[in-house]
DNA sequence: AACGTTCCCGATAACGTTTGCATAAAAATA
DNA sequence: TATTTTTATGCAAACGTTATCGGGAACGTT
C-alpha cells in the first residue's frame, strides 16, 4: 500500500510541502503553472490525503459509532441501513459495535468510543443496562450522542423512538375488539424504555375496555427459546389461560409462534397473536402474523441526521435544544389475530 | 470530550512527554517513584491514549472495512455478526460499507478504503460488478483482502465460500427425487461466483438424472419484486411450465413464495420450492420452506480470522499461501418440496 | 530612486504519540 | 580522588497534514 504523500510530491517537484498542500486544495496564492504541475503529479501517482493525519490535525475522524444489541436482528439491521445511507451521503463512516444485550459489553464498547475514535455515537441500550452513568458521563464530556429505540430519561440529548405506547395500545385494542379478554403480554427486559412504554400502552387499552389487569399475564423474557417455552407453559397453566398474546420483538414473536405451534394450539382460534416485528416474512408465516411495524429505516435515517447535525454544529456556541422524535408505528392486521 | 493528553500530564508533573510515555508503558528505565506518580495522575484524570495519533505513528488503524451488498439481509447481517465477534476479540473495529449491489457504489467505497483508513478489507462483491480491476489493484498495492461468499477468480487471496455447487446439486437432486422433472432455477446476477457455481450444481443434478437442461428455465433476477412477478409469469406461460423451483437468496425465495401464493398456485403440489436462504422464519412459513442453509456466522468468523492473520503477518517476509475455504451447506427439507 | 503592492512560495509549528540519542546526576569502581 | 558505569530523564525527530507567518522577487506608483 505504498501510498504517496505530500512530502513525496514536494520532494519530486522541488517544492515545499506547504506549496503542494495549497496547490492541491486549489489555493489562490499558488501560481497556476505550479498548481497544474502538482495536481498532475498527484493524479499520476494517485495521491490520496491520509485521513488519519487529517483526523489528528482536525481532531475529528469523520466516523460515527453505532452500538446495537444485535446486528443480526431485522429491526436493527434495518436501522443500520438507514444510518449508513445518511452517513454515506454526508461523508461519514459507520463503525459497528454489538452489546449482545450485555451491560458489560456495552460498557467496554463505550470505553473504546470514549477515546476519540469516533465523532459521535448512536446507541440503542442493551437489555441488561440499568445504569447509564457511563453514557451520561461520556455525553457530559462533550461526545455528541443520539439515542434511538431503547432510550433513557437520564440522558438529555436527542432521541428517536417509535410511538411504543400507541403501538401497544392499538395492538391490544385490536385484540380486544376481536373479542379477546384475557390478553397476555410477553415483553423484553423490564429496564428498557420500550418495554415500559409498551406495557403502559397495553395496560391503557385494557383499562379503556375495563378489563382487569393481571400482572401474571405480563412476562418479561430474555431472548432464549427455552425461556419462551417456560413462559408459555406458565401462561397456559393459569386457571384462566390467555386467549390473546402481544409480543414485542421479532424474536419473541417468532419464538412464541413456534412454541404455540409445537404445542398444537390453534392460532388465532385458541390464542390470537400480535407481534411488534419487522420481519419481512410476516405476511407469509403460518398463520400470517398481525404486526406492529416500526419505521426502522426512518429511525436510522433520522437518528443519523440528528447526530451529524450535532457533530457539525458542535463548534457553534448556541447549545442545541434536545428533542425526542416519535415515529409512528403501523398495525398490520393479518390472520393471527382475526378469527374466521 | 476534554480528554487529557500525555502533554498535559507532562506539564502538570513537570516532566517531559517522553518520560510520561515511557512511564505509562512501564519502561524499566523510569524511576519507580516517577512511574507511580505518572500512572496515578493518569488514572485520576482518566487518561486514554489517542488512537488516531497512534494510528498515524504506527501506520495502522486497528480497524477493518467490510463491504457487503446489503446490511439488511439476514445472510449478510449474520456474516457481519461473525466478523464483529472475531474482530472484537482481537481488538479491531469494524467499519461497514454497503454497495447496494451497485458497481459504482462499490467502487466509491473501495476508493475510501484505499486511503488507509482501514488495515484490511472483507468484501462480498456487488451483483453488478463485472470488473474487479480496482479491487485487484488495491490488493496488489498491499491491502490485505479476504473475499467471502461472492468471490472472484481474478484476485489471488484468501476466500471463504459456501459449497454452492454441492448445495444447488443436493437441492436439485432432492426435487428430482421428489418426482419433479421440470425444475426452474431463479438466480441472482450472472456475474456472481455464487450464481455460476449454483447453476453448475443445478445442471449437474439434472444431468445425473438425464433430465434435459432448458435454458429458458434459468432466470437471472435482480432483487425487485416486480421482476419476480415477470419471471414467474414467463415460467408459467411456457408450454411446459415448471413443477419445481430452486431460488438462491432470502429475497428471491420470499418473493417467489409470495408471487406464487398470490397466483393461487399450490405449493408443493403444483410447484415445489427450495430456497437458498438463512431466514430464521423459514420453518414457520406457509408452507414451511425447504432451504439450503449457509453457515453465515462461521463464514464471517473465518473470514475475519483470515484477514486479521494476514494483517498481523504483513510484516513477515514469507508471503502467505492463499487458500479458498469451502464451508458446507445443509439442506433442510420441509413442506414446500414434499408432496403428501 | 524609493517606496508600497502583489504574487508566490517556504519555514515552522501544531495535532498526540513513541523512540533513538544525548546527558546530567548518582553510584560504583579503581 | 579520579574514572567509569548506571540510572533517570530530556530533546528532537517522526508519522502526514494544514495554517500562520514571513519574506524575496517582480511589478507599479510617485
Image (cartoon, coloured by chain):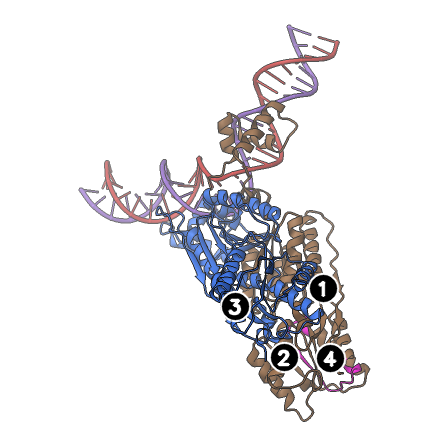
Chain colours: A brown, B blue, C purple, D red
**Residue to which mark 4 is pinned:** A337
Give the CA separation, mark 2 to mark 3: 30 Å
Most distant residue in the bottom direction: A239
Image coordinates of residue A89 in percent, x first then y, are 67, 49
Quick check: do tags 4 and 1 share a chain?
yes
**Residue to which mark 1 is pinned:** A295
Q: Secondary structure at mark 4?
A: helix
The answer to the question of whether label 1 and label 2 lie on touching residues, with beta carbons closer than 8 A, is no
Quick check: do tags 1 and 2 share a chain?
yes
Specify start and end residues of the magenta stretch as a single range: A175-195
Q: Is residue D9 left or right of residue B98?
A: left
Which mark sits nearer the N-terminus, 4 or 1? 1
Which mark sits nearer the N-terminus, 1 or 2? 2
Foreground disc of the pair 4, 1? 4
The answer to the question of whether label 1 and label 3 lie on touching residues, with beta carbons closer than 8 A, is no
Which mark sits nearer the N-terminus, 4 or 2? 2
Q: Secondary structure at mark 3?
A: helix
Foreground disc of the pair 4, 2? 4
Image coordinates of residue A157 in percent, x first then y, are 70, 60
**Residue to which mark 2 is pinned:** A256
Along the viewing direction, whichever of C2 and A145 lies nearer the viewer? A145
Give the CA separation, mark 4 to mark 2: 14 Å
Amino acid at each position: 500500500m505504498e501510498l504517496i504523500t505530500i512530502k513525496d510530491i514536494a520532494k519530486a517537484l522541488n517544492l515545499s510541502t506547504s506549496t503542494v498542500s495549497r496547490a492541491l486544495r486549489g489555493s489562490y496564492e499558488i501560481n497556476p503553472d505550479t498548481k497544474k504541475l502538482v495536481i498532475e503529479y498527484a493524479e499520476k501517482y494517485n495521491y490520496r490525503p491520509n485521513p488519519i493525519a487529517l483526523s489528528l490535525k482536525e481532531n475529528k475522524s469523520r466516523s460515527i459509532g453505532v452500538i446495537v444489541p444485535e446486528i443480526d436482528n431485522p429491526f436493527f439491521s434495518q436501522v443500520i441501513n438507514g444510518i449508513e445511507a445518511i452517513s454515506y451521503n454526508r461523508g461519514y463512516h459507520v463503525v459497528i459495535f454489538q452489546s449482545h444485550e450485555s451491560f458489560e459489553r456495552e460498557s467496554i464498547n463505550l470505553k473504546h468510543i470514549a477515546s476519540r475514535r469516533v465523532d459521535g455515537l448512536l446507541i440503542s441500550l442493551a437489555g441488561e443496562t440499568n445504569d447509564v452513568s457511563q453514557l451520561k458521563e461520556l455525553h457530559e464530556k462533550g461526545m455528541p450522542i443520539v439515542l434511538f429505540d431503547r432510550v433513557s430519561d437520564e440522558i438529555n440529548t436527542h432521541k428517536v423512538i417509535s410511538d411504543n405506547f400507541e403501538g401497544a395500545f392499538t395492538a391490544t385494542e385490536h385484540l380486544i375488539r376481536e373479542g379477546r379478554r384475557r390478553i397476555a403480554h410477553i415483553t423484553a427486559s423490564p429496564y428498557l424504555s420500550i418495554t415500559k412504554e409498551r406495557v403502559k400502552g397495553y395496560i391503557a387499552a385494557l383499562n379503556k375496555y375495563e378489563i382487569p389487569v393481571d400482572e401474571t399475564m405480563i412476562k418479561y423474557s430474555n431472548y432464549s427459546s427455552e425461556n419462551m417455552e417456560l413462559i408459555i407453559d406458565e401462561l397456559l397453566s393459569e386457571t384462566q389461560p390467555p386467549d390473546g398474546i402481544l409480543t414485542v420483538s421479532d424474536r419473541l414473536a417468532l419464538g412464541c409462534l413456534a412454541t404455540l405451534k409445537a404445542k398444537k394450539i390453534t392460532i388465532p382460534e385458541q390464542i390470537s397473536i400480535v407481534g411488534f416485528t419487522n420481519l419481512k416474512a410476516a405476511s407469509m408465516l403460518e398463520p400470517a402474523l398481525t404486526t406492529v411495524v416500526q419505521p426502522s429505516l426512518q429511525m436510522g435515517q433520522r437518528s443519523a441526521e440528528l447526530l451529524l447535525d450535532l457533530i457539525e454544529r458542535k463548534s457553534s456556541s448556541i447549545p442545541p435544544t434536545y428533542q425526542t422524535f416519535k415515529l409512528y408505528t403501523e398495525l398490520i392486521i393479518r390472520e393471527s389475530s382475526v378469527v374466521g
